Amino acid sequence: MLVVEDLRAGYGNLEVLHGVSLRVDAGEVVAVLGPNGAGKSTLLRTISGLLVPRGGGVRFEQRPLTGLQTHAIPLLGLLHVPEARHVFAQLTVEENLMVGGTPLAGSAERRAAIDEVWSLFPMLRDKARAAAGSLSGGQQQMLAIGRALMAKPRLVMLDEPSLGLAPVVVEELYLALGKLRRAGLTILLVEQDVHAALDFADRAYVLENGTIALEGAATALREDRHVREVYLGQ
Amino acid sequence: MTPPGRRGRRTEAALALLLIWCVVGAALLGGNPYWVSVATTVLMWVHLCVAWNAVGGMVGQISFGNAAFFGIGAYTSTFLAARYGVNPWLGMLAGGALAAAAGWCVGYLPFRWRLSHLVFALLTMAAGFVLQFSVNGMRALGGTNGLYVNAPSSLSNLRFDHPAGYLLTIAVLASATLLVVALLYQGRRGYFWRAVRDNEDAAAAAGVSLFRVKQEALAVSAFATAVAGTFYAQQIGYIDPHSVLGVDVAIQILLFAVVGGAGTQLGPVVGPLLLVPLGEALRLALGGGAAAELHHFAYGAALVAVILLWPGGVVGGVRRMLQSRRPPRPADAQGSEPASAVVGPPRAPTPIDSDTLVEVAGIGKRFGGLQALHDVSFTVRRGEILGLIGPNGAGKTTMFSILGGFQRPSAGEVRYGGERIDGLEPHEICRRGIARTFQITQSFPTLTVFDTVLTAALVRHRMAAALGVAQAVLVRTGLWERRAALCAEVTLAEQRRLEVARALATGPTVLLLDESMAGLTPRETDAALRLLRSLRDEGLTIVLIEHVMRAVMNICDRLVVLDAGRLLASGTPSAVASDPQVIRAYLGAAAPGR
Amino acid sequence: MTLDLALQAAVSGLLMGGIYALVALALALVFGVMRVLNFAHGDLLLVAMYGTVVLNQALGLHPYASTLLLVPLMGVLGWGLFAALIRPLLGSSALMQAQLTIGVSFMIQSAALMIFGADLMNVRTSFESSTLPLGRGIVVGVPLLVAFAVSVLACAAVAWFLARTETGVRIRATAQDPVMARLCGVAVPRLQKMVFAASIALLALAAGSLMTFFHVTPTTGVQFSILSLLIVVLGGLGDLKGAFVGGLMIGLAESLAGAAFDSALAPAVIYILFALTLLFRPRGLFGRGSIA
C-alpha cells in the first residue's frame, strides 16, 4: 500500500535520511523504531508532504506522492498524526473533528463520521463542547486519532502516540488502536516505547542515523539484542 | 598579519568618500545654484542615511524613528540660539548630546530585555510621534507654527549667502560621519556589529555584550542624525514639527538606505545619490503640481522592488554580480602559511583550583504549566568529558540553556568555581570561561570563517593578539584552509568544527557542545571525536549533549542521564548502559504478556 | 472639562471607535491567519474611500449604494493583491513585511496625490448634517451612528461566520496551527487568499459608511495604517476580540484626550499607551495575542 524507495531528506545543510526504503502492506501494522535523531519523525513528515525529499520517492497505492501539496495527501486516504498531537487548542473537540473531516464531501458525511468517532471514543463525546486544550494528554491523543479517522483514511501514520502519557493511558490507547486494526485500518507507527510497539506491530524497521539498521517480524526483533545495541550504542 | 577583508572594506569607505566629493565637485563646476542646492540635499540625506545605517543596517536594529533625533538637533540649536544666543555650532554639539541621551533612553528597555526587532522599530516610531505631538503643543518651541532662524551670514553662525557654503559644510559633516562610522566598522566594533546583526544568540555566547553594542551604535546614530538636524535648520532657516519630526522623514531615511544597500558602507551613499536626483528630474520633467508626486511613487516602487527582487539593495546586487563573475579566490595571500609563533589554546583568566568545576544543585525549571526540569543535581569535574543524555523531551536542551545563561532556573543554583552563575547573561558566562556551541546550521551567515573566529577572539584580546588567537584556533580545528569561505558555504562537518573553533577562541575552561555529531558520517564522527579527545588532553573540560550513542559511549568519561526532567542515573558509560532504569527509559517497560 | 462635555466626547469617540474596530479587525484577521503585518492596510482603505468619491462624482451614487459595488470590487482587488503582495511575504520576518508594505503605502499615497490632488474630498449626502439627540444635551450625527451600526454588525457577522460555519472553523484552525491544518486536508494557501480578499472587502464596507461624514486626503491612508497597527498591537496581535475592543478604546481615548488636552498634544497619549503596551504587555492588553 505504501512504498518508500531510497528516500533522502533533511533540513538545510543537514541531511537526516540517507536513503530509506520500506513498505507497508494493506492491513498491516508496521513500526518504525530507533533512537532520537535517527530520523523517524523526518520520515513521516517527508511522506506526508511537510518536507520535500531530496532523493528517492514515495508511492501510496501505486500513486507517486512527490510534488503533491501537503493538503492533497489526506484526500488520498493517507493521514499523519504528528508528534505532540497538535490538537487545535482553542477549538472545541467537536470543531477539531469537523476540521479533520475536511476531505469529506459534505456536512452530512461529516456528521455521520463524527458519530462514528463518538462510538469509538465515548469519553470524547462527553467533552464535545470543551476546548481541546483543556483535555488531558491521553484524551488529546484520542482526539488527534479521532480527527485523523474523520477523513476515512486507509493508512494512518502515528508519530510517538505514547509520548508523555502514563502507562495506564498508553494501554487504553493501544486497545483503541487494536480495535481500529481489527476494523481493517493499516497503521505505520513510530514509537519511543519499543516494547509497546513491538507487542502491537506485525513488522518493524529500526532506523539509525538515517538508514535502516534492522528489519523483521516484530516477534523476532523483540528478542534481538541488536535492537538494544542500536539504542544504547554499545 | 592584517585581518582578511580589511583592504576591501577600506576601499569601499574610500569610494564612498570619493563619491561625496565628486558630488561637490560636479555641483560647483556646474555653477548653477539650483544644482548646488540639490547636491546639498543629496549630501544631507547621505549624512542621515550613513547615521541610520550604523544602527539599522550594520547592527540590524532597524529604526523607524530617526526623525526624532533629527528634530532634537534642529530644535535644540535653534532654541538655544534664539533664547540664549548660543552659537549654532555649540548648539549642534548640545543637540547631538541630547539626541544620544534620548537614544539611550529609547533603547534601554528593548535592548535590556532583548525584545524583538519589530518591537524596537515600533517603539522608535512611537517615540517619534510622541515627540512630534509634544512639540506641537509646546509654545516655547513655537508649537505648530515652528521656529525661525535669524542670524546674519557667517561661518560661525552657520549661515551663508552663497549656497556653496552650505554644500561644503554638509560635505564636511557627511564625510566626518562616514569616517567615524567607517573607523568603527573596520575596527573591533565592526566585528561585533556584524555578529550581532547576523545572530544575536551566537554573538552573546561568544561573549559579546548585546546591550552595549546596540546602545553604542544607537548613540552614534542619534548624535550624527542630530548634527544634520542643526544643519538643516540653519540652511532652511525655518523648522516646524512636521518637517523635522514627522514619520515621513524617518521612513524616507530608511528607504534611501535600504534601496542603496543597508549594512554596507557604500549603500547609504548610493541610495540618496540615485534617488534624490531621480526625484528632482521627475519633478522637473513633469512640471509642478500634483504630477510631481511621481517621485514619491518611484521611491515606493524602488523599495518594493528591492525587498522583493534585489535583497541587499543596489550595492548588494552589484556585489553579487561582481562575485559571480570573478573566479573563486584562493585563501588570502597574506599569511597563507600559518605563522610558527602560534599561541597555544587560550585560557580563561580565572584560575580555578578545585577538582569540581561546575556544580549543578537542585535545578528546576517551569515553563507555564510544564515542569521541564525537577531537582537535577550533578557535578562536572575538571578535565573530564561528561555526556548529558536521555530520551526525547528529557530536558537536556533546557539544562544547557540554563548552563549557558539563556534561561534562568526556577529553582536551584549553578556554581562555577564556587561562584553562582545562574542568572548571569550569556556573555558574562562566556567571559568567565564557559563557552557553548549551538546546533543551528549557520552561525553568522554573512561572515567568513576567519571573521567568525576573530570576532570571538576580539572579546578578550586587542586586534593584534586576537589575530594570532584566531589563527591558532583555526589551525587547531583544521579550518585554516577554509578561512576565507563564508559560514553559509561550508559543509556540515566544517560547520560543527567552526562552532567549536568559535567557542575555543574565547579561551574557555569548559566547553558545552550541543549535538555536534548529528548528521556526520562515521569518518567525520571519528575525526570529531579525535579533536575532542585532544582538547581534553590539553586540559579542556567538555560537557556534551548527544543522541549519537556510539559517539557518546566512545568518548565520555561519565554520563548523566535525564528522563522527563529528572536525573535518572549517572556514572560510567558501561554502568549506565546496563542500568535497568536507563534501559527502561530508552526502550520502554517490557510488560509481561500484553 | 465638564461632565456633559466628557459624555459627549465619550459617545462620539465610542461611535468612531466602532469604525476603527472594523478596520482593525480586518488587519487582525490577516495577521491571525497569515502572520503578515500589513503596514499599507489603511492605504487600502484609502483606495476604497476614493472609490466611493469617484462613484459619487461620476455616477451620482450614494455612498451606501457604492458600498454594494465596492465590496465585491475590493474583494477582487484583494484576491489579486494576495499574489503580488502577500504571498511573497509569507514566512518572512516582520520587518521585511513592514518595509515592503511601507513601500506600497508610499506608492498608494503618492498615486492618490497625483490623481486627486492634496485637497480634502468628501461626498455630500442629504442627511449629512442630521443629528440625533440622546438626552443630557448629547447629540450624535446620524451618519456616524449608522456607520457605527454598520461596523458593529459587520464585526458581529465576521464573528458569527468564524464560529458557526465549517469554513469559519477551518479558518480558526489555520490561524492556530497552519501546518496541522494542512495535515487535515485544509487547502491553506487558498484559504489564506480568501481571507485576505475578505478583509479588503471589509475595508470597502468601512469606507462607504465613513464617507458619509468623513473626508479623505491622500494622507488619510497612512493615518489609518498606523492607527490600525496600534489597535492590533494593543488588542494583541491576531486576537479578533482584542482588536474590536481595542478599536473602541482607541476611539474613546482619542476623543476624550482631544477634549481634555490641548488638541495638539492629545494624540501623544495614544502613542504613549502603545509604547507601554509594547514594553510591558507584548501579548496585548488582554494577553491573548501572539508576542510582538
Image (cartoon, rainbow, N blue to C red):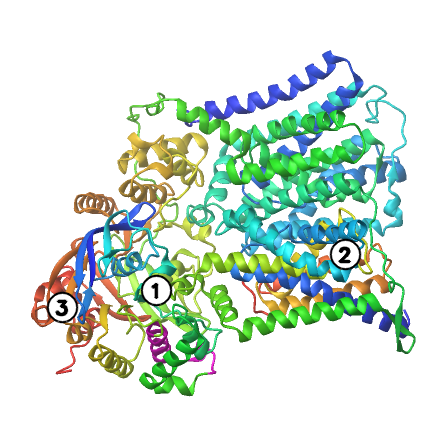
Q: Distance of mark 1 from mark 2, alpha carbons?
A: 54 Å
**x and y percent of residue B553 in the render?**
17, 57
Q: Main secondary structure of the magenta part?
A: helix
Which three-letter amino acid code belongs to the residue tagged 2?
Answer: Ala
Residue labelled with disc 2: C268
Residue labelled with disc 1: A75
Judge by depth and name the residue closer to the eye, A232 or C46: C46
Q: Can you say whether A128 is above or below C107 in the image?
A: below
Extent of the magenta region: A129-149
Residue A130, magenta (yes or no): yes
Q: Secondary structure at mark 3?
A: strand
Within 10 Å of disc 1 (Cα), the crowding (few <14, some 14-19, many 20+) is some
Q: Distance of mark 3 from mark 1, alpha carbons?
A: 26 Å
Q: Distance of mark 3 from mark 2, alpha carbons?
A: 69 Å
**Left or right: residue B28 compared with residue B140:** left
Within 10 Å of disc 3 (Cα), the crowding (few <14, some 14-19, many 20+) is many
**x and y percent of residue B200 in the render?**
47, 48
The disc placed on residue A203 is 3
* Residue found farthest to the front: C59
Which three-letter amino acid code belongs to the residue tagged 1?
Answer: Leu
**Left or right: residue C272 compared with residue B393:** right
**x and y percent of residue C58 in the render?**
79, 49
Chain designation of label 1: A
Chain designation of label 3: A
Residue A40 found in image quarter: bottom left
